[in-house]
Amino acid sequence: MLNSYLLNFKNFLSLKAICQVIILFGVLFMFYFFLQLNSLYFIFTPSVFGLVALLLFTILVLLNVYFIVILERKVMGAVQHRFGPNVVGFFGFGQSGADGGKLFTKELLIPRYANTFIFLISPIYSFLCSLLIWLFLPYSSYGAFVNSDVGMVFLFAITSINVYGIIFGGWASNSKYAFFGAIRSSAQMISYEVSLSLTLMPILLVVGSANLYLIIEFQEKVLWFIISYFPCGILYIISLVAETNRAPFDLPEAEGELVAGYNVDFSSLTFALFFLAEYSNIIISSFLITIYFFGGWNFGLCGISFHFEIIITSIKLVLFIYLFVFLRATFPRFRFSELMGFCWKVILPLAFSFFLFYTILTIWIWIECFYESLLLIALSILISFIHWFLALVFFLLSFYVGLVYYLPEQIIPVYKKFDNKVLLWARVKLKEIEKT
Amino acid sequence: MKLRGLIEDFFTEINFKFCRCGSTFHQTISQQILSFHNFEEDYLHFLTQYLRFLAFCQKTIEFFDMYWLFEPFADEEFVDSLFMFSAKYPDAGLILYLPTSDIVFMLTSLAENYLWLKNLGLSIPLVFFFIKSIICTSLFSILTLDIFRLENLVLYFDFLSQLFLIYDTVEELRVLFILFNFYNFELILNIFFFSLKYDIYPWYMGLYSKSEYFFIPLGILINFIIAFLLLFLVYIINRGTGISDLEKTSAYECGFDPFKDSRQLTDINFFRVAVLFILFDLEIIYLIPWIFILYASFYNYYIIIGGFSYLFILSLGLLFEYKSKMLDW
């Protein structure tokens, strides 16, 4: 596992791949820059103009999805020692357009025993849910389409509703693969949703409002939450990856067991809608990470102008999309029982305990030493350092555990020998010290 | 109480930043609760909003340029009549001159230095009510005169012109006089204030509208229409191409026809996970308001203990599930 990981990483940093990815990023940035339509909503008040703005916005989002699909394929190609899509268009940028055109001209096939209404509604539903979240996401300090005071709760709600699309799709197509895939993925999404919302509770407690704008502004004033709530951030990212059904948690798309999960019987545009929803969910999840833990549009050190804000959000966003692709390229897939155990036995208790810890800590700080703001900042920094240290220790420990338990048996003796040598060396040294 | 004041100041400092983004809806929960009791602040809030709106009114008036109305009067007769009027009633000019300038000055100074007044112990609504009553009396004293007589009209225009002269100090307030001195002053003003607060001001400033949530159903509608239209288009394009066949439309499995109905019994674990999910999701649903209440009550002892007892029971439940191997697959 480690070998393959390192090998992949080496290819990951190859010059050609980097060049290709940089060009792609340039195109992506362009589109993100156009997304500042989002922040001009004050011209498009709820009216006909608002409708036009929303239409433009959805089209831009779909264009983003278009480019991110190519990005993923390119990066995966670079990792796996092959050219990615390089035939259609300049550097293969027209590839997903060609794919979309192909899907568009395919026959819309409805299975014999399927419930037609639910079968046709479910892709529309999931597409709708994934595009609806975009209204709540603030790109810059000018806010989003909907600057609601309960934006976070809205996001929870929509993400939890998202499951129904998959369940309906799997159930309505009336085939066994689709059914089991749907059940599996719904169970997975449900169980990771709990930890997804539990890890954000400390943030809610500190900021005191569910407004996304305020959350980001708080981070600008004090600290990025990834520094002050490091373990929560890590747990959040892991559970988001599981929530979006991405690798290494992509059980619904397990080719070996279930052919394509809940997607099996969907053809042409019904499949395309599911596909679009999935990829826009990836962008949204990276957006959520930036909002909750990486300070949204903040540069970190100093204030910046409006246009730079958008550029910085887009940079962060693309980096996290890159992380998603990186995870897919490097990590092997979980077994389903492992996945569920990982959620209920590891992530949920950890999230729960961290939530308790942070609530106690914040309450203590607020009651005891709120008026001494310097002390507060010093305390937060100290605590964050402790967290970083603990996280590092746990990270190294996990590596050790991985080496011992998951490596093939051939490699273990080498490490054992190494350990014995170290122990022997230590014993000799100790004896020397005792003698002196 | 000291702590409470400090907290309040801290969050007001933060929230003044968000004035460009929105209004009261963008405050924190604690501040909303505080401001619910703090009527002074609320009053000042919509007064500032109103003053901003007046700039808009001024622009519109400048656009229509009402001064052309006074042009016919600007001849020798008019000037003579003015002189004559001043000769007839030498005190009138003074009477009108002094109170208006004083009122205007007082209004501006009060609006600017409301904090100073607050320290004196005067509540701001009271002060403004006082000033308003002065204005009303002066205006009604004018209106009781016969307006249709030219002399009184001149007197009235003199009053207005004095207001117009003080450009720098009161750009907005003069428009207030023009718009509202003809009718029942307070009633219309109060109605207008609230209409401004909820309808016109946000539209003008373009920062926040109450019907912001309108974008949600609009978004749902648009996305649904896009998806539905695409599906319909695909159906129309590829209608005649495919051949419907029993084998083709059968569910995807291995080469055989599907043996049974696919809606079979499944593993009990899925059901168990669903039940657990309901429990923990409910927990989170209760935690969100708990956090807000905790925040709003400035960490009340009883609320903390109540929440923690709830969490303790839940954690015990999780431990029990873990020990009895319910979480194993």
Image: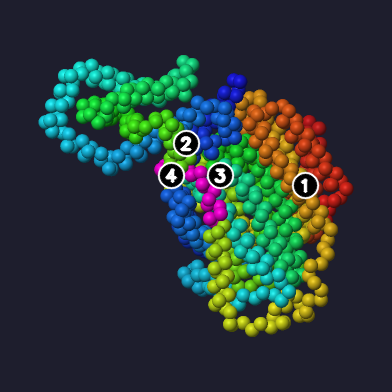
Query: The residue marked by circle 3 belongs to what chain?
Result: A
| Magenta highlight range | B204-219
Distance between the alpha carbons at the discs numbered 1 and 3: 28 Å
Q: Amino acid at mark 2?
A: Phe
Q: Is residue B9 above or below residue B229?
A: above
Q: Which residue is mark 4?
A: B203
Q: Which residue is mark 1?
A: B279
- Mark 3 secondary-structure assignment: loop
Label 4 vs label 2: CA separation?
14 Å
Q: Are marks 3 and 2 on the same chain?
A: no
Camera-side residue: B144 or A431? Answer: B144
Q: Is residue A8 above or below residue A315?
A: below
Q: Which label lies toward us, 3 or 2?
A: 2
- Badge number at residue A148: 3
Earlier-in-chain disc, 4 versus 2: 2
Q: Main secondary structure of the magenta part?
A: helix
Element at badge 4?
helix
Crowding at dot 4, Cα within 10 Å, few <14 / some 14-19 / many 20+, comes out as some
Q: Is residue B197 above or below residue B123?
A: below
CA–CA distance in space, label 2 to label 1? 45 Å
Residue A108, magenta (yes or no) = no
Q: In this figure, what is the number of numbered marks?
A: 4
Q: Residue visible at 34% across and 30% down?
A: B181
Q: Residue furthest left?
A: B76
